[in-house]
Image: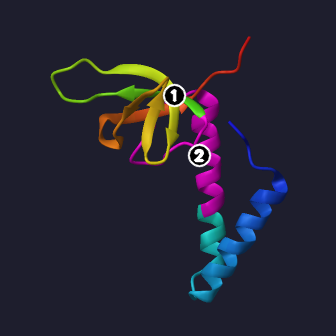
Amino acid sequence: MTTPTDAELATLSIHAMAEAERRGEDLEGQLVASHRAIYEAARSEASGAWIPCEERMPVPGAWVEFVVARDREAEPYAMCGCWHNGSWTSFGMRWTPASVTHWRELPELP
């Protein structure tokens, strides 16, 4: 996974805060919520926890492990692949967003 640089994160934060200010939103609350979301995301990924797709999707093109659960009758299974152009892909196969429930970062190699 490509991690954004500090400069890229700072630029995104500045743009988000300027947009919030333009809309008349509470900047302090926006900043606290933003930092809390970043902290929780980093904590989940660092622990290898499964992240629900309805909560957020991975960075497009980053290889992750994901759970395919097409219907209630079939046993769910895990695959390695990536989220790209609105669908999950792995070695030439594709899954719709509705058929994938969770994902997590791949562990570091030993």
Residue drawn where x is 30% and y is 35% of the image? 99
State the extent of the magenta-drawn residues as a range: 34-62
Query: For mark 2, what is the residue?
Result: 40
- Helix, strand or loop for disc 1: strand
Task: Residue 51: say if magenta.
Answer: yes
- Helix, strand or loop for disc 2: helix
Q: Position of residue 107 (x, y in %)?
A: 64, 21
In front: 67, or 36? 67
Residue drawn where x is 74% and y is 11% of the image? 110
Q: Where is residue 20 in the image (x, y as percent from the top left)?
A: 61, 80
As drawn, the residue found furthest toward the right would be 7
Which callout, 2 or 1, points to the residue nearer the camera? 1
As drawn, the residue found furthest toward the front would be 92
Q: Position of residue 44 (x, y in %)?
A: 57, 36
Residue drawn where x is 56% and y is 87% of the image? 23
Task: Residue 26: say if magenta.
Answer: no
Image mark for residue 81: 1
Q: Does residue 52 appear in the picture of this structure? A: no
- Give the residue type at disc 1: Gly
Q: Distance between the Cα atoms at labels 2 and 1?
A: 23 Å
As drawn, the residue found furthest toward the top would be 110
Image mark for residue 39: none
- Give the residue type at disc 2: Glu
Q: Compared with residue 16, is residue 84 higher up or lower down, i.e. above or below?
A: above
